[in-house]
Amino acid sequence: MTDEILVRVEGRVGRLTLNRPQALHALTTAMCVGMTEALLAWKDDPAVELVLLDHSGERGFCAGGDIRMLAESGAGDGQAARAFFFTEYRLNHLLFEYPKPVLTIMDGVTMGGGVGLAAPSRYRVATERTTYAMPETGIGLFPDVGGGWFLPRMPGHIGLWLALTGARVKAADCELIGMATDFIETGKIEAFKAAVIADPAAVETLLTEYEGDPGRPPLAAHQDEIDRLFGKDSVEAIVAALEAADTDWARDQLKVLATKSPQTLKVAFRQLQLGGQASTFAENMEMEYRVGARVVQRHDFIEGVRAVIVEKDNAPKWNPPTLSGVSEQIIETIFAPLPSAEAWSPLTGL
Ligand code: QUE
């Protein structure tokens, strides 16, 4: 048991509350285990009609994963890092296949591992404090937790743009990309949760009743440009298209991409290609686990965490330093199948 997750049943609602506020609720293995056990117990429990997933305190829903632990493990034998991904991806998959409605309140920062919890939920509520991103290319990781499934299924090439640039978007854009199903003002969230707990069968009526207006999505102005410039068959071709575009927006994207791990850019590109072709979510997670098991032990991840999270100099020295240095052979090595005894598998009996 861990106090990093609060688990209780309120009325006919199973409630999971992320409770690691000092780390913006970044997920630990114990938190993933705690949520998985509760979800499995409630799955066949007729006293639970709906699952509510939220966070304690004021700051953000979930910043991601316990990155320091992953980097420390990756610098050694990688065992704890692989155990984390194995458990976290099983939880992502359990949420995806869950037979009861899951309602996730994304009030504040919802990035990386937090997206992995929210995206497979049936109802995904954004507020004016929601900030969504998949920022992993900035630390030499990759947009995992189901990014390979969800990102290529967003409109046009927006998902690939989000994956490569790590761009942060707010509530209205979350609706545009399909990440949020609903918008409720932060100030009404407590009353909304109380109403759902009082009558979970009325969740859809309540979502309509509490629905607010997130405003216009700023991304709409760039959708044509994204689709034209990111709809290419390699990262190099995207960079070439951005260089040829000669607009302020394209120049900004180039500047952002120049700060990211070249290895990770190519990994994310391949991940979204493969995930986009996957016929099941489980197949995508099995692919992501192979990648996660490899990249945590590679230079760029350990260096990225040093530069962005630990020392915060924000000056990672990527190796290889350029896209052309990241050979097809490096990418093949990262995506190669694992020995069958080490491969990821979903929980059985769902
Ligand atoms: C990429 C990431 C993460 C990140 C920054 C990145 C990530 C993560 C955190 C994070 C942020 C604040 C905290 C914390 C962790 O930052 O996964 O504990 O207080 O968890 O560029 O993937």
Image (cartoon, grey):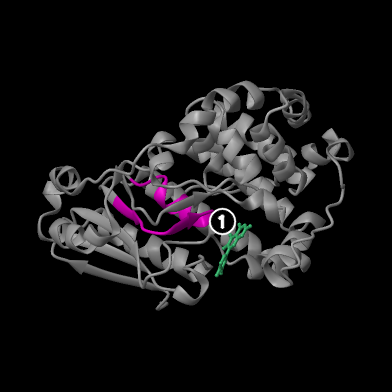
Q: Which residue is mark 1?
A: 86
Q: Position of residue 225 (x, y in %)?
A: 59, 25
Q: Position of residue 347 (x, y in %)?
A: 45, 51
For the point 68% across and 22% down, which residue is it?
232
For the point 40% across and 78% down, which residue is it?
3
For the point 70% across and 63% down, which residue is it?
308
Q: Quadrant of the N terminus?
A: bottom left
Q: Position of residue 142 (x, y in %)?
A: 65, 48
Q: What kind of residue is marked 1? A: Phe
Magenta stretch containing residue 113, yes or no? Answer: yes
Q: Residues within 10 Å of mark 1 (few under 14, many from 20)?
A: many
Query: Quadrant of residue 307 in the image?
Result: bottom right
Query: Quadrant of residue 74 in the image?
Result: bottom right
Q: Is residue 287 above or below residue 1?
A: above
Quarter holding ligand 1 = bottom right
Q: Is residue 37 above or below residue 202?
A: below
Left or right of 120 on screen, residue 28: right
Q: Is residue 336 visible?
A: no
Question: Which segment did they paint magenta?
Answer: 103-121
Q: Is residue 199 above or below residue 180?
A: below
Q: Nearer the viewer, residue 144 or 86?
A: 144
Q: Secondary structure at mark 1?
A: helix
Q: How many marks?
A: 1
Magenta stretch containing residue 7, yes or no? Answer: no
Q: Is residue 111 visible?
A: yes
Q: Position of residue 98 (x, y in %)?
A: 33, 47
